[in-house]
Image (cartoon, rainbow, N blue to C red):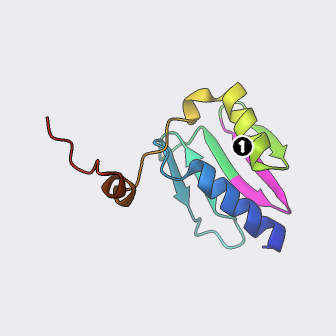
Amino acid sequence: MGADDGDLWKDVDRLLRRRPGWRFRALATPGAPPRWCFGPEVDPVLTVTVQAGSICVYVTRTDVDVTLATVDELLAWLVDEWPEALPEQSGRRMDKLTRGHLFDWE
């Protein structure tokens, strides 16, 4: 993985982590890159990985590959094509604690 791939991975991780429906999967297959998956665990509808300085999205239902240069392009593509894949990121407990919202009393 080159330096560009590492930076792209960090950007993709920031965009997709803690979003419901997304999970990170490191594949046990030698040489296969890790990927972010959206949808059912057995048969995800979208996968996102980084290879050779590009963000690669695979849509399993239509067998379509999309290659994007930046995380901004990924965000725009998801907004246009798969808005359901962009639910609000869930907050971390530490964020809630520092804002005083860990426990909401009614």
2 vs 10, left or right, is right
Residue 106, percent across and down?
13, 34
Membership of 96 in magenta stretch: no
Q: Quadrant of residue 61?
A: top right
Give the amino acid type for the residue marked by disc 1 in the picture. Tyr
Name the residue located 74 percent from the left edge and 48 percent from the top edge: 71
Please tell me whether residue 47 is drawn above or below residue 98 in the rendered image.
above
Membership of 57 in magenta stretch: yes
Count of labels in the image = 1
Name the residue located 64 percent from the left edge and 29 percent from the top edge: 82
| Dot 1 alpha-carbon crowd within 10 angstroms: few under 14, some 14 to 19, many 20 or more | some
Please tell me whether residue 24 is drawn above or below residue 67 in the rendered image.
below
43 vs 47, left or right, is left
Q: Judge by depth and name the residue closer to the eye, 27 or 4.
A: 4
Q: Quadrant of residue 98?
A: bottom left
Q: Quadrant of residue 35?
A: bottom right
Residue 7, percent across and down?
75, 65
The quadrant of the image that shows the N terminus is bottom right
Find the magenta span and give its range: 49-60
Chief secondary structure of the magenta span?
Answer: strand
Name the residue located 74 percent from the left edge and 69 percent from the top edge: 6
Name the residue located 49 percent from the left edge and 44 percent from the top edge: 89
Q: Residue furthest left?
A: 106
Instruction: Name the residue that disc number 1 marks.
Output: 58
Give the secondary structure at mark 1. strand
Residue 101, percent across and down?
29, 47
Residue 90, percent across and down?
43, 46
Q: Residue furthest front?
A: 99
